[in-house]
Image (cartoon, rainbow, N blue to C red):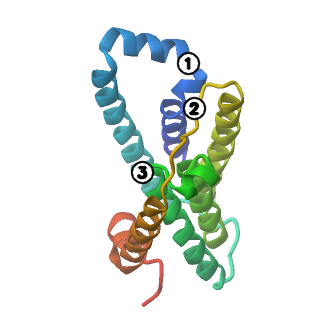
Amino acid sequence: MLLLILCLVFFFVTHSLRFIAPGWRDGMIARMGATPWKIVYSLVSILAILLVAYSFDQARQVTGMLYYPPVWMSHIALTLMLFAMICLAAGCLPAGHIVAKTKHPLILAVKIWTTSHLLANGETSSVILFASFLAWGVVMRILLKRRARAGEVVSRAFVSVRYDIAAVVLGIVLWAAFIWKLHEWLIGVQPIAM
């Protein structure tokens, strides 16, 4: 369990550098250059994700249950995950109306993902994982709102409905892939009992 907590701290620190150490981050970009920084940052981010996944798998084997959610909560979780996948896809595409309305669809996707999984999972390790990501998502949204109010973030002037259509289609395809086999392959758990 300690390993999971340490890996989560590592993940959140590396994914919050813009807010917790902006001077250090800017100095590294100036020293390395933007492209090398992005490569190193991407590699560290991938490492952080892998460490969280590994430590969660280890913690899952030794922790007990905090609560037993009713079976029907898994249906709500599956439905919410559709919206999370659409927000995830929207955040990876140029601006559509989904991006314009939600402002930060990737952060919203994280918050929906964590909420849906907290509804359907009562294991101690799951609660620690998803509650910490939910808290991080809430904090990030607040910090991003402050940046926008300070004029640090420029809103996108042009939005296109075609990117919304693409986000919905991609989100549905990704959601279906996770239900079909991807969740089981990546996580080891089937989201729907077959």
Mark number displayed over residue 92: 3
Give the SS element for disc 2: loop
Mark number displayed over residue 21: 1
In the rendered structure, the answer to whether residue 170 lies left or right of residue 108 reads: left
Give the camera-side residue of 155 and 19. 155
Give the SS element for disc 1: loop
Among the 4 quarters of the image, the one containing residue 122:
bottom right
Task: Residue type at mark 1: give it.
Answer: Ala
Task: Residue type at mark 2: give it.
Answer: Val
Q: What is the CA distance from the residue labelled 2 to the residue labelled 1?
A: 21 Å
Q: Using the rendered image of the protein, determine whether residue 114 is visible from the camera's viewpoint.
A: yes
Q: Position of residue 95 (x, y in %)?
A: 48, 50
Q: Which is more foreground, mark 2 or mark 1?
A: 2
Give the camera-side residue of 78 and 48. 78
Q: How many marks?
A: 3
Q: Residues within 10 Å of mark 3 (few under 14, many from 20)?
A: few
Q: Which residue is mark 2?
A: 154
Q: What is the CA distance from the residue labelled 1 to the residue labelled 3?
A: 25 Å
Q: Using the rendered image of the protein, determine whether residue 109 is visible from the camera's viewpoint.
A: no
Q: Position of residue 130 (x, y in %)?
A: 60, 55
Q: Which is more foreground, mark 3 or mark 2?
A: 2
Residue at figure coordinates x 69%, y 65% from the top left: 66
Residue at figure coordinates x 53%, y 12% from the top left: 23
Task: Residue type at mark 3: give it.
Answer: Cys
- In this rendering, the answer to whether 44 lies above or below 25 is below
Q: Quick check: marks 1 and 3 in contact, CB under 8 Å?
A: no
Image quarter (top left, top right, bottom left or bottom right) of the C terminus: bottom left
Mark number displayed over residue 62: none
**First along the sequence among labels 1 and 3:** 1
Q: Position of residue 149 (x, y in %)?
A: 72, 30
- In this rendering, the answer to whether 76 lies above or below 40 is below
